[in-house]
Image: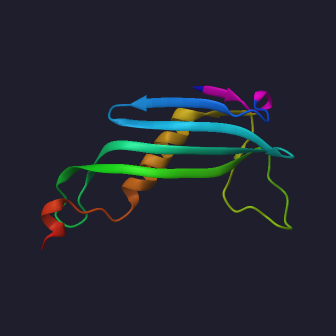
Amino acid sequence: MNVTLRKVGKTPLDFEVKSDEITFKGYLQYYADKLILLKAKLSGKITTNCDVCAEEFMLNVDEDIEFFISDGIYEKEEDSILDVVESFDSTIEIEEIMNSETELIKSDYNSCKNCKTE
């Protein structure tokens, strides 16, 4: 799902993207200047490897995601907002954000239920 940032207004623009056993659902809303607020929930199951035994397992995911998307370079320094993703072509690909957030969760320390009891 490709969204043109200039079309995002004060009224929330809902989205829902599904892939395998994961769902990314939320909305985009104009915030200020060139900033768009993305607020969503990532839920379902993803396949990852245990950091203890290296076995593959299904990880339950239930994450709230919130950050800003800048239509162009984000230059404000006073009261700067730290969670800003910059878009250089005035569009944002929702599936790409979902995949990035999923990979971020996978890169965290994860252990399977067998290794959690040891």
Residue at the spot x=62%, y=37% of the render? 27
Point 32% across, 44% down: residue: 46
Residue 4 among magenta residues: yes
* Residue 37 pos. (x, y %): 70, 45
In the displayed structure image, the side of residue 57 where residue 6 appears, left or right? right
Q: In this rendering, would 45 be left or right of 42?
A: left
In the displayed structure image, the side of residue 110 where residue 83 appears, left or right: right
Q: Position of residue 32 (x, y in %)?
A: 84, 47
Q: Is residue 50 above or below residue 101?
A: below
Q: Quadrant of residue 55?
A: bottom left
- Which residue does the image show at 57% across and 38% down from the upper left? 26
Q: Position of residue 104 (x, y in %)?
A: 45, 54
Q: Where is 15 relative to 59, above or below? A: above
Is 109 displayed left or right of 86 in the figure?
left
Q: Residue furthest bottom?
A: 118
Closer-to-camera residue (30/57) = 30
Give the quarter of the figure containing the N terminus. top right
Q: Where residue 115 sits: x, y (%)?
A: 16, 67
State the count of labels.
0
Q: What quarter of the picture does the C terminus occupy?
A: bottom left
Front residue of 30/81: it is 30
Q: Judge whether residue 78 is colored magenta.
A: no
Which residue is drawn at the image coordinates 24% and 63% (left, top)? 111
- Which span of residues is magenta-colored? 2-7
Residue 40, picture quadrant: top right
